[in-house]
Image (spheres, rainbow, N blue to C red):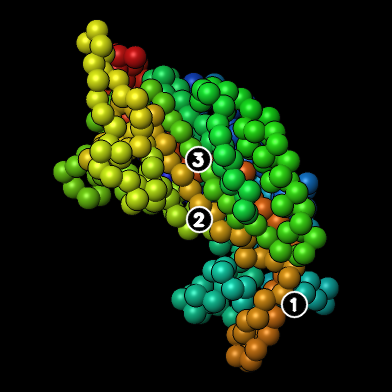
Amino acid sequence: MNKFRFLTSGESHGQCLTAIIEGVPAGFRIKSSVINEDLARRQVGYGRGGRMKIEHDTVIIKSGVRFGKSTGAPICLEIKNKDYENWQEVMNTEKQDYPAQETLRQIEEKSFTTVRPGHADYAGSVKYDLKDLRDVLERSSARKTAIEVAVGSIAKQILKEFGIQGFSHVIQIGKVKLDFYPKTYTLVKEKAEKSDVRCSDELTSDRMRNAIDEASEAGDTLGGKFEVIFGNLPVGLGSYSHWDRALDGRIAQAVMSIPAVKAVEVGAGVESASLLGSQMHDEIFIKNKTIYRNTNNAGGLEGGMTNGEALVIKGTMKPIPTMRKSLATIDIKDMKPATAHFERSDTCAVPSCAVVAEARIAIILADEILNKIGGDNFAEMKGRYEL
Ligand code: EPS
């Protein structure tokens, strides 16, 4: 069973987003300021829409932590939706017996029945028998990834205590690809953090921004590719024993289920199809009793386990399906042809998606570390783990 697990709740324009995390050992210092920094990293990015100007995502730690340290009890986190102020009538959780005319007008204005191709609207309405697609949109929105980043930030804080750190960067937006990386991961990270498209190369960043501008002018949207790298992992996280314990599989699930992600690659990924075995596999050398390799096509995973090399995961995000350019669709009210619903949206959210993927991977890695070294409290864990 997973040691580190969590559930979230909350709608995009509801009161708040909430998470309850189980499995954080007692005695961890949890810094809300670090969580807020991660939340801010998710919010920025060239191509984001109007919503991010309204929100200033800030975490409230509601339980499980006392004077900054975890007690071993479940931890409850909350992020308030500032935009709820404008949606109180529409997103009210109470039954209103005699709603005012103005309330009815607002609910009507915000309800819609023309499904957005590429979004959860059609299947969601059939599955849950929802007639107003507002009910599908609100929970399927990528807004919920904000609270996941808060959970991931706690996972990252745990990993950091064991010397494990990671980062994310963008390697493609639309057709614009990053052709070369700075020499070290430290440099890639530093440069990507400074770029509003999370790309380590300035010229490529410019070209990415231009592509986003062009898509925006055309009322269109853009997807792309990002990479998440974690280093200093111990050998043997994950397992080859059962399919659901293979770490590549766990990570793929965690990244693939981020809204709009369509592909996940480990190391050389899809490229490996065209390589010979002798080109693909990372030869092993030894010097002064230290093992090393000159390549990392495996992306740090062999046999579903970490092999001591950096974990390298790529994710592909499709263009956001909420778009000004109207797409052909159906109206579920009368099942007649229609054009798709548009509501304020982002032109491109690949940089944010990279931050979400970083959080999701951190959650899986924290769970693996907790499983490996166990421990109900931090002191016990530290004693069992040599950096
Ligand atoms: C998002 C909040 C949303 C969207 C976006 C992600 O805010 P709103 O719907 O109020 O504009 O900006 O969600 C989508 C584009 C989507 O298709 O789900 C956020 O906080 O990340």
Q: Give percent across and percent down for residue 381.
A: 31, 20
Q: Answer with mark 2 or mark 3, whichever residue precedes in sequence.
A: 3
In the displayed structure, does residue 88 sit left or right of residue 201?
right
Look at mark 2 in the image and give the residue it sits on.
261
Give residue 118's quadrant in the image. Answer: bottom right
Residue shown at 43% from the left, 30% from the top: 230
Q: Nearer the viewer, residue 336 or 286?
A: 286
Q: Give percent across and percent down for residue 20.
A: 47, 43
Look at mark 1 in the image and give the residue it sits on.
108
Q: CA distance from mark 2 to mark 3?
A: 13 Å
In the displayed structure, does residue 352 sit left or right of residue 161?
right
- For disc 1, the neighbor class at 10 Å (few under 14, some 14 to 19, many from 20) is few
Pair 2/3: label in front = 3
* Kind of residue sitting beneath label 2: Val
Q: CA distance from mark 1 to mark 2?
A: 32 Å
Q: Nearer the viewer, residue 42 or 82?
A: 42
- For disc 2, the neighbor class at 10 Å (few under 14, some 14 to 19, many from 20) is many
* Kind of residue sitting beneath label 3: Glu
- The yes-or-no answer for disc 1 within 8 Å of ligand 1 is no
Q: Residue furthest top?
A: 288
Q: At numbered mark 2, what does the secondary structure look like: helix, strand or loop?
A: strand
Residue shown at 57% from the left, 68% from the top: 119
Q: CA distance from mark 3 to mark 1?
A: 42 Å
Q: Give percent across and percent down for residue 323.
A: 70, 66
Give residue 188's quadrant in the image. Answer: top right
* Kind of residue sitting beneath label 1: Glu
- The yes-or-no answer for disc 3 within 8 Å of ligand 1 is no
Figure check: 33 above or below 113: above
- For disc 3, the neighbor class at 10 Å (few under 14, some 14 to 19, many from 20) is many
Q: Which mark is residue 227?
A: 3
Q: Answer with mark 3 or mark 1, whichever residue precedes in sequence.
A: 1
Residue shown at 71% from the left, 44% from the top: 207
